[in-house]
Amino acid sequence: MAEKSKGEYMGRELAEGPDAVTRTIREAVDQVKAAASLLKELEANGVKRGYVIGSGTSFHASLFLQHLFSKYTDFHLAAVPASEFTEWRPAKGKYFIIGYSQSGESSDIVEAFNVARTMGVKTIAITNTFGSTLSRISDAAIVTRAGEEKAVAATKTFDVQLAAALALVYTLTGKVFSEIERASEAAREVLAKKNLLREVAERYVKAEHAFSLGRGAGYPIALEAALKLKEAAMVHAEGFAVREFLHGPLQLVDEGTPVFLFAPSRASFEASIKALERIAGYKAPIILVGPKASEFKDYASYSLEVTGAGEDANVIPLVKVAQVFAFYISVLKGLDPDKPTKLSKVVKY
Ligand code: AGP
């Protein structure tokens, strides 16, 4: 059998994301409805407080779900890393848990769900694996339809986690899914521009440090972009909420430190202008990603247009830019993003 080439899995899987998103919202619709019914039942019984937990990429999806719940529902949902849940859960009162795990097997989240079960807490799992432990021990399960993911770095499974968040909140609030379909199309358009992203990656392949910033729905994407650069491309990258960056990390920028801004809307760029001015003042190369990015090109070394969906669903094409960029940095460095040397696909230890 021919040996697999470096990055073969990650390259293929990130390109499968748009199809995985449309498949998920079409095929998992009944599971999404069942999860929404359980939440409505809890709400009717006075349980409006919940926690959404996950690890790594799945924690970033959790943050996005918290953002959507705060923006559109009356629930109070807090995102907590799965491994920290037992330390942060409330001592009193009723609550529910939503758990994100693509494998459905990470020990941190399985343990948190097991503890919750013994206490009679209702649980909803969002996983990419049929029959996984998490889906079996939960009261309701949404199984996303990305198919098996072999690369250690999650790409298409994050896309579907975002889609599941949107689908759940749209179902709770009576909205149709057309925006998610548009987002998947917009992610396809990002993939069609991959040569341009490769050129940007060539320019920054030597950078040892990088930052990624985002605001609102763009914040979890900024965190995810930094994680992809770390695990796939061995770049020391950190993600921050845009204006949090001014409260300390700004000290570290210089002309060799690329700074990405992931903006899900034009308004998000506008709200970031003062921060961009400060960062540009220290000659850091700025890469803007989002709709209408070119209107703000005076602040940036690159402005990468992402179009197609509304502010919330735009996270799907935004993160595609981050995934493709990390992939190219990795392969240009001669690394294998499919198998970072110190990581395993599922953390069970
Ligand atoms: C993702 O790129 C990482 N490899 C990692 O952070 C992963 O998301 C995390 O270990 C959680 O895995 P799970 O979703 O299978 O629980």
Image (tube, rainbow, N blue to C red):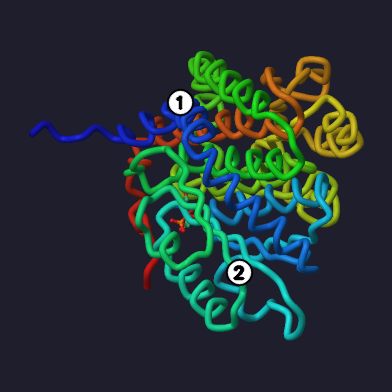
Looking at the rendering, in which quadrant would you find the C terminus?
A: bottom left
Amino acid at circle 1: Asp
- Give me the residue at 67% from left, 42% from top: 212
- Give me the residue at 65% from left, 29% from top: 177
Secondary structure type for disc 2: strand
Decide if residue 160 is on the left or right side of residue 213.
left
Q: 10 Å neighbourhood of mark 1: few (<14), some, or many (≥20)?
A: some
- Residue that protrudes farthest toward the bottom in the picture: 91
The percent position of residue 148, horizontal first and vertical second, equals 33, 42
- Residue 164: image quadrant is top right
Decide if residue 127 is on the left or right side of residue 299.
left
Q: Nearer the viewer, residue 98 or 213?
A: 98
Residue, disc 1: 19
Residue, disc 2: 122
Secondary structure type for disc 1: helix
The percent position of residue 67, horizontal first and vertical second, equals 76, 49
The percent position of residue 202, horizontal first and vertical second, equals 50, 25
Q: Is residue 328 visible?
A: no
Mark in the foreground, 2 or 1: 2
Vertical placement of residue 229 versus 118, above or below: above
Q: Earlier in the sequence, mark 2 or mark 1?
A: 1
